[in-house]
Amino acid sequence: MFSSKEEFKQSFVTRMEHKGLEKTSELAYETLWEMMQEWIQERWNRTSQLYKENGEKQLYYFSIEFLIGRVLGQNLINADHYNLVKEGLEELGFQLSELEELETEPGLGNGGLGRLAACFMDSLASLELPGHGYGLRYKGGLFTQHFVDGYQTEQPTQWIQEENNVDIRREELAVDIPYYGDPQLVMGLDGLKVKVEDAEWVKAVPYDLPVVGANGGTVNTLRLWQAEVSDRPFPGNKDYAVYQSETAKITDRLYPEDSLDAGKILRLKQQYFLCSASLQNILNYRNFAVETLPDNVAIQINDTHPALAIPELMRLLVDEHALSWEEAWGITTRTISYTNHTILEEAMEKWDSRLIQSLLPRIYSIIEEIDRRFKESLEQQTMDEESFHKLSIIENGVIKMAVLAVVGSYKVNGVAKLHTEILKKREMKELNEQFPDKFHNKTNGITHRRWLLKANRELSGLISETIGTQWIKEPERLKELHYFAQNHSFLQEFQAIKSLKKDHLIHHLQRDQNVIVDPDSIFDIHIKRFHGYKRQLMNILHIQMLYDRIKRDSTYRPYPRTFFFGGKAAPSYHFAKQVIKMINTVAAKVNSDPLVRKHLHIVFVENYNVTQAEYLIPAADVSEQISTASKEASGTGNMKLMMNGALTIGTFDGANVEIFDQVGKENAFVFGMRAEQVMEYEKEQSYNPKDIIEADPEIAQLMEELVKGEWTEGKTNVDFIVEQLLEDGDPYFVLKDIRSYSKAHEQLLEVYAQPEKWAEMCVKNIAASGIFSSDRTIQQYSDDVWHLTKIPSVH
Ligand code: TH1
C-alpha cells in the first residue's frame, strides 16, 4: 500500500484527523479499509484493462456458495503489507489483530464446498490467472449457532448492512431473469423462434468484490447477484405484491443444507437466477463472436447447483442468438465443465419435472430435448434396463441434475482419487462408459496463504527462517523441512509455536465462551459440518468409553486430552442435531466429574465458522478425520490441519488416502474399514451391529448405559441415536469401527509420551502438505480443463 511504514503512518494519521477527534478502533478500522480499498481499486482497474486488451480466455467459476471468511487481513497479506501496517498501527497505539476482529465474517457458504470456492479464487488471482467467481449476494449468510440447554438454535445472520458494505454495486450491468410465462413460437427476422410471453421478470444486480492475488497486482472479480423487482411490464393477471415479496426472497438467505438435496422451489429460483444472470453477463460483454465462446470462456460448475447453466446457455444461444440446436449444443458442451462433490444419495439433486415445467417452462422443454436426443443416441446400443435408467436425465417425473451435468459438459471431475474412482467404477459407471474421456480427478486443495501464512504467522515465520521464503510461492518446497524433522532446536521451536497457538485459542475461547482449557493437554480437534457419515457420534461414544474405563480401572490414568468439537447441523437434520445435544450432555457430565476431568475435557466451540477455524487449526495436535470410508468425497479440513502440524487420526476416505500416501502411514493414525468393505457390506446388507455388541463387552456396557438412560439428563434422551445404532442397522458403521478407532487413540497416546518423536511426525506432516495447496489444484484444472494463460500483472 505504501513503500514505507512512515508513509503509511502519515497517510493514516491524516485520514483519521479528517474523520474527527475520537481515535476509536472503529474509526481506525474504517480508515484502514478505505486505504486498502484504494490500493486495491487501482490494481483492479489495471487487471480488468489488461484482460480486456489482452483478449485471453477467461474462466468463470459458478457456485451457489463462496465461504470467503474475513478479507481485511488476507488482503493485507496478499498485498504484502501486513507487517508494515501492523507495526505502523502499533506505533500509533492500535493492534491490527483487534481491528481485524471488527470485521463481520460473510458466511456465504455452509462448509467444504463453499470454502473450496474461496480457496480457488485466492489461488487463481495469486497464480495470475484470469478466473472469476459468480455467486449470489445473500443478505443473510449461514445462521449463527447458539446452544440453549445443549441444543443447537439458529439465529439469522445479517451480513449486508444498510451502508458501508465492502462490495460495489454495478447497476449498469443489471440483467433481467424470466420466470414462469408461456413459451410461444414466433416469426422473427431469422425464422421461427421461441419467445416466452407473460414472464415474470426479476432484476439481477451485480455487486463486485475484489479478489487480491498474492505479491502482485492481479485483482480478479467475485461477482455476486442480488434480486430486485424489474422495470419490465408485469403480467396483468398476477399479484404484484406477491411478486415483490417473492423477489426479495431469492437472495435473502443462504440455504443452510449441506450435503442434502433441499428440493425447495426457492432453491430452484436461486439456482436459475445465478445461472441466467451470469451467462447473460458473459454474453453481453464479450468481444468475440458467439461461435467462438469455447475458445474465450470456460465455465466450471461447482456441483450440480448451477447445472441449469447448461439448458440456460442453450436457451440464450438458440432463442436470443439464433443459433441452430446443433451449433448451440456444440458450444455449450465445449464451454461447461462440472465438478461432482458427493455420492451421497440424499445430496444428489433431483427436481420434480412439473416444478421446473411451471417455474421455467422454456428451460424444461430444453432439458426434455437434451434428454430425447441423448436417448436417441443410445438406441443403437444394446443395453439392459438398469443401465438405461442410470443414463436417463428425465425419468418418472424427476430430473436428475447430475446426469444432465455430465451429458452437457466436456469434463467431469471428482475431488479426490478415491472419490473419482468410485464415480467412474460405480456411481457413474454407465456415464463413464458413454463418455470415457470426460472423467478425471482433481484432488482438492486449500490456500496456504490463508491457512498457514495468515492463520499461523508464527509457524510461517519459523518456516521462512529455516528454509527461506520460496515456499510461499512454491508450497511444494515445504518438503525442504524434511531435513529439519530431526533437528532438535528446530523441533523445540516448533513445539514452542504450537504452545503459543494453543494459548491464542485459549484466550479466544475464554473471551468468547468463558471456558478454561488446560494448555498442557492434547488438543484433539473435530471440526466440520455435523453429519451422520462424518461420525462425530463415534468420537463422543469413544470418549464415553474412556470415561467408563477411568471409573472402572484405577490403573488407567491417561494423559490429559481436550476434545474440541465445532460444527453446525442443517436446521432440518434431526439426527445431527441430536448428536450435538448428546455431545453437550456428555460434556457436562465429563467436565464436572472431579476424577475424569483430570484426564478428559470436552469443549464444544459455538458457531464454528472460518474465523473460529483460524484459531482452532493452528492449535491442533490431533486432527479427527473419521468419516465412514467411501462417504467423504475429499475433505479439506484434513489438509489445513496437516499443514499446521497436527497428526491425523483417520480412515481411508477421501483425500485422507492421499495424505497418508504423502506423509507415510507411519506418520498418522490410520484405522477402520476400507471403502470396498463398506460398499460390500452395503450391497450384501450383511452388517449387524448386534454382532459387535455381543463380542465386545466394553461397547456392550456403553450401549446398556445409554439404553438405561445413564447418559441422559432431565427430559433429554438419546433414544433416537440408540435406535439408529441398534434398530436401523448403524448405517455409518460407528460400532463396527469404534474398536479400531479406540486402538488408534491408544497408539497416539504412546507416541505423544515421546514429545520429540511427536514433533518429528508433525514436521513431516507440514513438509508433506505442500501438494495440498489449491495452487496445485488450480494449475491442474488450468492445464487439463480450462487452458488458461497466465497474465502477469504490471506494477
Ligand atoms: C463437500 C464434500 O462433502 C467434501 O468431502 C468436499 O471436501 C467438499 O465438498 C469440497 O469438495 C460437499 N459439500 C456439499 C454441499 C452441498 C451438496 C453437496 C456437497 S458435497 C449443498
Image (tube, rainbow, N blue to C red):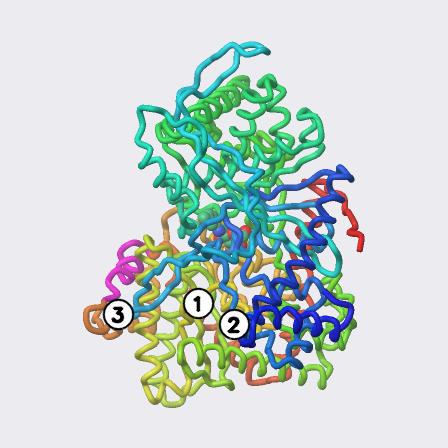
Check if mark 1's residue and mark 3's residue have beta carbons within 8 Å.
no
Could you say where residue 700 lies in the image, as x and y percent from the top left?
30, 70
Dot 3, how many residues are within 10 Å of its Cα: few (below 14), some (14-19), or many (20+)? some
The residue tagged 2 is 616
Amino acid at pointer 3 = Leu
Magenta span includes 725 = yes
Does 134 appear above or below 717? above
Amino acid at pointer 1 = Gly
C-alpha distance separating marks 1 and 3: 23 Å
Left or right, 500 with reference to 149: right
Does 255 appear above or below 719? above
Left or right, 367 with reference to 761: left
**Circle 3: element type:** helix
Check if mark 2's residue and mark 1's residue have beta carbons within 8 Å.
yes
**Circle 2: element type:** helix
> Closer to the observer: label 1 or label 3?
1
Could you say where residue 180 lies in the image, as x and y percent from the top left?
39, 27
Dot 2, how many residues are within 10 Å of its Cα: few (below 14), some (14-19), or many (20+)? many
Q: Return the mark for residue 706.
A: 3
Amino acid at pointer 2 = Leu
Quick one: 607 or 795, which is closer to the camera?
Answer: 795
Kindly tell me whether residue 512 is visible in this rendering.
yes
**Image quarter of residue 716:** bottom left
Quick one: 333 or 439, which is closer to the camera?
Answer: 333
Q: Return the mark for residue 566.
A: 1
C-alpha distance separating marks 3 and 2: 31 Å
Does 77 appear above or below 710? above
**Image quarter of residue 360:** top left
Q: Which residues are magenta?
A: 717-729
